[in-house]
Image (spheres, rainbow, N blue to C red):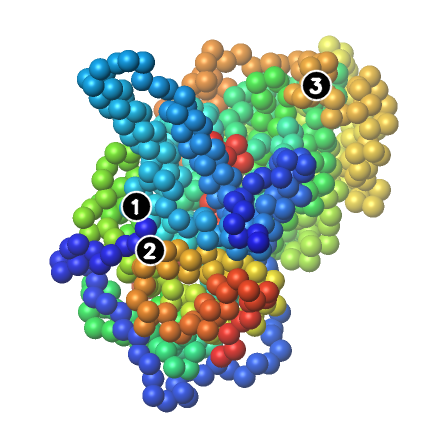
Amino acid sequence: MHLGAPAHAENTPVAVADNTSLPLASASASAAPPATTLSPPGADTLRKCELSKLFFLDHYFDLLTYLDARKARLAAFKRDMAARTPPPSSGADVLATFEQEQEAAWRYFCGKERAHLRKRRTRLRLSNFELVRQIGQGGYGQVFLARKRDTDEWCAVKKMNKHLLHRLHEVQHILTERDILTRVGSPWLVKLLYAFQDMESVYLAMEYVPGGDMRTLLNNSGVLRQEHARLYVAEMLTAADQIHRLGYIHRDIKPENFLIDASGHLKLTDFGLSRGKLCAEEIAYLQARLETARQAPLVHRTVKERWQIYQSIQREEVRAFSLVGSPDYMAPEVLQDVGGRGYDHAVDYWSVGCILFECLAGFPPFAAASSDEVWRNVYHWETVLERPVYTGADAEFNFTDEAWDLVTRLLCHAPQRLAKLADVKPHAFFSGLPAQWEQLRADATNPLSRGVTPPFVPRVADPRDTRYFDNFEDPKDMAMYKEVHARQAAHKEKEGASASDGTPGAPRSAFIGFTFKHSGARSGSI
Amino acid sequence: MQQNKTFKPKKNIPEGTKQYQLKKYAEATLGSGNLRLAVSLPEGEDLNEWLAVNTVDFFNQINMLYGTITEFCTPQDCPVMSAGPKYEYHWCDGVQFKKPVKLSAPEYVDHLMTWVQSQLDDEGVFPSKIGVPFPRTFQSTVKTIFKRLFRVYAHIYHAHFPRIVSLGEEAHLNTSFKHFIYFVQEFMLIEKKELVPLEELMKTLTNENKQQPKPVTP
């Protein structure tokens, strides 16, 4: 099959003139530089090479699978047609009808193949999803509950503005997140289904986890019973361990980042900061905050006072704080490590230690009325960390000895910290749980495994039910996001100013290799 | 002798494993017969539909390949878009650039890829809705796209091949380009004179008797 000259070559619609290729007389014009030793490639290049390998492997695997499956379909169709014979001793008109039917079947078959081929070609766009409603708000974009129209898959679509990401130096973070997500095969981590982009935004379509987050659960329950805290903390550590096995540090573990799935078990999400390198602006920011924390006098407050302060802060503000980078759950070595990366995955164990404290006490261990004071508290954590002691009617809120012991083994200097799953598991606090923590959740491939039943199992009426998420149509719920919106507006303003002064936005190549489809969506079958 | 065999998945390696994928990939890369067969129009398929899906695929491949060398393809190192000392490309799109303009390679490639992307995104050129026909001028648009994409391969081979080798990207580049050339030949998409800068390489890559493709030496 060859393409002749296009039939309408004279009125070419391509709104472009021809480009010229000029054979040059002189060979000197753009001679290649002499071969010298090559400078080592940067991290960005290495990442793209890694992606490129996966891309080509995937691409050719997918192409060949498609061609093979298509050939099989054609063969099956032909066999099917050959098996049909016109009724014996039939007249010419019957024969003609039979042939027409064969014709129609062939046209139908080809039409289906053609539609399938077109679907393979078209890139994923936002319009392929029905956005049901907003369920989340992050620093640089929103999260929507969405349904992929053709496959009926429910997902959480995270939309992020490219220019804002570029401005906030978050491009690297979002690429890191995408890279981690594409490698996730663990039930403890939120899966990525699709990644796609358009001119303005990048999108991550993730597995939808309907039960809301651990923050909401903690806000609603105040204090957890120890046996419930035991299960959740074990699950958090299991999830963190999965990230560590992939070779990453999460670095931003907090209750907001644990989502509750339909069975009530936890899934860790938001890997944007994992392994992330800090940019100069972030480092400067951290340094300034640390300096303030160092200089300000530490105000000693009793546990009771801190509990009261935490109670008096509106819940909404707690959420807003965590969105704009309060260090409540950050290990001191992260705060003090300015650019040096002198810490390891043990920082995630610290964060879980803070959540353990919060589950049992009702407030995180370094809670304060302002984020400045939280910084100060974390900086002076050795002085601030105290076992809450209650008397009288409140005595039931006292930590058990094994609970407090675990807190102090997680909230301590890094070298002494329990920072391996195998080291944490035997702790007395966890006695009563199955020895293999992977078995806390039922194994989908093993019908005999039951898992442990979590204390809270979300009850959603249908896939569109978002009762466990903030209501973004409610102005009261919206008030808590005002700080985030203000920051975004400020950046947008700067963005507008720079567009006219010629400061470049995100280069086209910055998001190469972002696009992704989960393996189930790529098979050759129709 | 391999050439006449059509591709068949091996059943003895468990499906879905890395090994299985690698096996298939190796077959695709090494058994050139596969790529030859992969370009031909499937029985009963619409020619434009087939051209369209392959255009998108090659664009994505080149985008990926050029992406791995953007760090080294700078206005300083590549002040002119060229394919070796004898060929220079000047950019002209009839819209922003009415007359051919000499641009650095990264600028030229950026204009080129942005232009292709805009064509692919244009519902009037590459319709995405099922049932919407292609425009009458579709094939000449496709030819222009292929002619331009070829120039990116030509620049990579002539200016960045040692780097490609050091990054371990050589096999991908060669496979991609070989596939591209098979497709171009099958549907006669690019004029012969445009292909001159990589003539030698094309001969080597598409010659089934020789074992190893040799890179062009500028």
Marks 3, 1: nearer the viewer: 1
Q: The disc labelled 3 sits on which kind of residue?
A: Asn
- Local SS, label 1: helix
Q: For the residues marked 2 and 3, what is the alpha-carbon distance in whole angstroms?
A: 52 Å
Disc 2 target residue: B187
Label 1 resides on the chain identified as B
Nearer the N terminus, badge 1 or badge 2? 1
Say whether residue B63 is visible.
no
Q: Where is residue A424 drawn, in percent x and y? A: 82, 31
Q: Are marks 1 and 2 in contact (CB under 8 Å)?
A: yes
Marks 2, 3: nearer the viewer: 2
The label on residue A446 is 3
How would you rate the neighbour count of disc 1 (Cα within 10 Å): few for under 14, some for 14-19, many for 20 or more? Answer: some
Residue projecting furthest to the front: A89
**Left or right of A169 on screen, residue A340:** right
Say whether residue B38 is visible.
yes
Q: Where is residue A467 drawn, in percent x and y? A: 47, 17
> Which sits in the foreground, A304 or A498?
A498
**Residue at left 57%, top 60%?**
B171
- Local SS, label 3: loop
Query: In terms of image quadrants, where is residue B129?
Result: top left
Label 3 resides on the chain identified as A
Q: Are marks 2 and 3 in contact (CB under 8 Å)?
A: no
Whether A57 is drawn above or below A373: the answer is: below
Whether A342 is drawn above or below A461: the answer is: below
Disc 1 target residue: B47
**Residue at left 36%, top 34%?**
A113
Q: The disc labelled 2 sits on which kind of residue?
A: Phe
